[in-house]
Image (cartoon, rainbow, N blue to C red):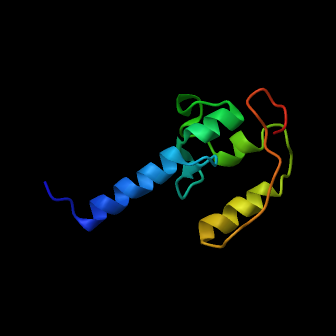
Amino acid sequence: MKIDQTQYLNKSLEALFKDSLDAIVHINAGYRIIDINQAFVDLVGYKIDEIKGMHVDDVMNKGKQGSADQEITKKILKGDNYTGEGIRTEKDIHMV
């Protein structure tokens, strides 16, 4: 069976997402969570069935008011690059 270039790219991206050592959350244009990888589960403690469909900033900024992280999310979704580190909230509300 021959796979076309689009299928190949999709499989490659899926493998990068699943196997990455970095925590990755896949969101839609409305900032809603579509999927997470295992590194995200290990870091934050949520499983996909607990947060799928939730707004990413509601999950990542739990317990923080007026977070600058929301501006970073908007920049990234506009296609801007962002490099940096941030403090995130784990499921039990301690910072990671």
* 74 w.r.t. 38: above or below: below
Horizontal and vertical percent position of residue 56: 65, 47
Horizontal and vertical percent position of residue 23: 64, 46
At 60% from the left and 49% from the top, the residue drawn is 24
Horizontal and vertical percent position of residue 4: 22, 64
In this rendered view, identify the residue nearer to me: 88 or 64: 88
Q: Farthest left residue?
A: 1
Q: Relative to residue 84, is residue 5 drawn left or right?
A: left
From the image, which quarter does the C terminus lie in? Answer: top right
* 56 w.r.t. 90: above or below: below
Quadrant of res 75: bottom right
At 29% from the left and 64% from the top, the residue drawn is 6
In this rendered view, identify the residue nearer to me: 62 or 14: 14
In this rendered view, identify the residue nearer to me: 77 or 88: 88
Quadrant of res 53: top right
Q: Relative to residue 30, is residue 82 drawn left or right?
A: right
From the image, which quarter does the N terminus lie in? Answer: bottom left
Q: Farthest bottom residue?
A: 80
Quadrant of res 10: bottom left
At 70% from the left and 35% from the top, the residue drawn is 44
> Number of labelled discs?
0
